[in-house]
Amino acid sequence: MTHLDAFTSRLDFGLDDFQRRACEALEAGHGVLVCAPTGAGKTIVGEFAVHLALAGGTKCFYTTPIKALSNQKYADLVAVHGHESVGLLTGDSSINPDAPVVVMTTEVVRNMIYAESRALDGLSHVVMDEVHFLADRFRGAVWEEVILHLEPSVRVVSLSATVSNAEEFGDWIQTVRGDTSVIVDEHRPVPLSQHMLVGNRLFDLFDPADRAPERRTGARPRVNPDLKRQIRHRILLAEDDREARGRGRRSGAPRHRGGRGAVLSRPHMVGVLDREGLLPAIDFIFSRAGCDAALSQCLRSGLSLLAPEEAAAVDEVVDRHLSDLSPGDADVLGVD
């Protein structure tokens, strides 16, 4: 039985063609670059690298660009291989760092290389998840340094969302690391729907009629006519608003503030997404302070995503767990 056969025997699904080709290349001793859409299942190739390392008595590092992804992948691998086989190293956490499989942020492995850490001894595979972050000017250099300076014997498994220059990127990896198989799959198993928020209304970006089976001709989709009408309407309103402000300044009237182009607040936006059935959703905020401020804004707004009976169930659970706290502890923790 091959290592791939042993690996797939514990899965409850079959491998797609690109997954199988990437795993076969990895078992044959090649490095791999796998480019496939989000949700296509690229990480199964990284998990096979973990399987190979454990089966061969060597080490595997599983790297991600951000701590949240590292924490998630650590939990996934622990569920399969157990706490004793998997560790975690991020700026915030150090769990079982001497395990044969260690999940870490890319900066950690880069620092290990420069420090000539003994933790690199016995390393056979490094998985670089979300490697398309190379385009990020803050993180890209870290990826590049790791790819360039890892020992030649280490097999690098690069997992990327679809990028326009996958072959060019693969050629570069082959130049600096040697034998690397480039596997590209453009089938998107998870549909991608695009919307635009105009004012407080959410529109399909493309004409919904084009999704009908009889209209799927492969032609470029048309922009939603309702969206175009709404944008034209708001442009006219904005022009009227500017003219009114101009007349007000000439007449000495108090200056009008706010206007029709005011930015929709975050709580209002979340409410719109909830109304349209598009939650849960991810709002990209690029700092911890910004995330904290967004949370405070939603709390102050009184935003609630629960039906009354759901809110009552949550209250019951919270009250039950808080009943053991002393008044002093509740005050310190800000329970109110």
Image (tube, rainbow, N blue to C red):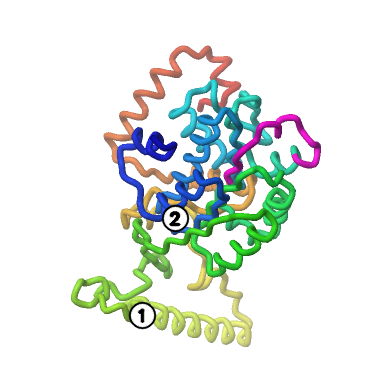
Residue at 62% from the left image edge and 52% from the top image edge = 286
User: Residue 126 colored magenta?
Assistant: yes
Question: Farthest right residue?
Answer: 115
Q: Is residue 331 visible?
A: yes
- Using the image as rendered, state which of residue 162 and residue 183 is in the foreground: 183
Residue at 39% from the left image edge and 66% from the top image edge = 194
Disc 2 marks a residue whose amino acid type is: Thr
User: Of the residues under marks 1 and 2, which one precedes in the sequence?
Assistant: 2
Badge 1 density bin: few <14, some 14–19, many ≥20, Cα 10 Å: few
Q: Which residue is mark 2?
A: 38
Picture layout, residue 162 above or below residue 86? below
Disc 1 marks a residue whose amino acid type is: Arg
Drawn side of residue 317 relative to residue 283, left or right: left
- Using the image as rendered, state which of residue 175 and residue 192 is in the foreground: 175
Residue 220's disc is 1
In the rendered structure, which segment of residues is drawn in magenta? 113-127
